[in-house]
Image (spheres, rainbow, N blue to C red):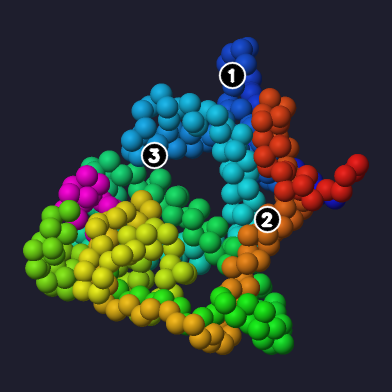
Amino acid sequence: MNKMFRLGGLAGILLLGFSFISAQETEVRVVDEVVAQVNDSVITLSRIKREKKFVIESYIQDGKTRQEAERLVNEREGELIANLINEELMIQKAKEAGLDQDVDATLNQRFVEIMKQNNVRTLDALYQMMRSQGVEPDDLREMWRKQATRDRLIQREVQSKLYWEASGREVKAYFEANKGKFLKPETVSFSEMFLSFAGRDEKAVREKAKQIYAQLLAGGDFDKIAKESGDTPIISDGKGKLEDLRVSEIVEVVGDPLKGVKVGEFTAPFAVDELGMAILRVDKRELPNGEAQFDENAVRLAILQEKAPEATKKFMARLREDAYIKINDTYRPLVSPILFADERKAKPAGK
């Protein structure tokens, strides 16, 4: 049963009414069109236009023409709105769980690190520097906030529960039934050099990464160059090195560049999300063998990886079920089939 939340006060009247009448004029002025109400928050048309513009620019940076980018975004408008509704639900849930303060602290620390990297003393000075390079700090902070909020919430509400859900007996039984998954794995150890985009011209950073890569291929000292020219490592969470990582568990953005790179060699420069450029040096590789090894953490992670996608879908479905979601009649046919797709699949035939 959906729980209904109402907007109160003048702001709610203005938004839900879609317009107001000026005391000075008799004409009606449109404030902003509400595309969806999500509990006590709203998603407006202006917000959707901002998101579309951001995605279009991302497509263009990836090499698509503006016309092609606009076509792709317009075709996926329903998906974009559905994602914004889900995102709003997650932000609300994270705030309810008190995760927003932790996220804010993490973001503040991240900006402090950027200040250190750029030898800037104040946040205002950093913001000015970033804007001079075409980077809007408020947009960057908001993008990082959404990403961190989503990750923390899923980790707390889904992944941590799944990890400990299986009993010791079930963990052992899973290992015995899936020994092929627990053969001694291929592992890799690497050192990281990272060049941040923050506060800098992205093209210049990419070009600098190419120049450093050429230096390394010519015999340059990786550790010395990383210390002199690199920023705080991001893949290794500031450590600069990671050891004995299972190759099968490394995310694609890092795993793909590492493929085929021998010990002592370097990856070509590659982008880490929209944060900066990385170059990795492979320090050690260990090949797999045919012997199964029991490691409780590895088994629990395997169970988590297997169950997480479906568990995440169910978690999001519960958020929607417990929420008051009202979609503007104009957009409902476009959004509802996408937003409630999982619920409809799970619904018994004839109901």
Q: Image check: 315 left or right of 344?
A: left
Residue 313, numbered circle: 2
Residue 29 coordinates in the image, percent (x, y): 59, 19
Cα distance in 3D space between marks 3 and 2: 27 Å
Q: Quadrant of the C terminus?
A: top right
Q: Image check: 189 left or right of 171?
A: left
Residue 274 coordinates in the image, percent (x, y): 36, 51
Between 188 and 279, the one nearer to me in the picture = 188
Task: Say if the magenta span includes residue 207.
Answer: yes
Residue carrying label 3? 58
Helix, strand, or loop for circle 3?
helix
For residue 28, what is the image quadrant? Answer: top right
Identity of the residue furthest to the top in this view = 26
Between 80 and 121, the one nearer to me in the picture = 80
Residue 13 coordinates in the image, percent (x, y): 69, 33
Residue carrying label 1? 29
> In the displayed structure, would residue 126 be above or below residue 183?
above
Please give the range of residues in magenta: 193-209
Helix, strand, or loop for circle 1?
strand
Identity of the residue furthest to the front in this view = 290
Cα distance in 3D space between marks 1 and 3: 33 Å
In percent of the image, x 32 and y 72: which residue is there?
238
Task: Say if the magenta span includes residue 202.
Answer: yes
- Of callouts 1 and 2, the N-terminal one: 1
- Of callouts 1 and 3, the N-terminal one: 1
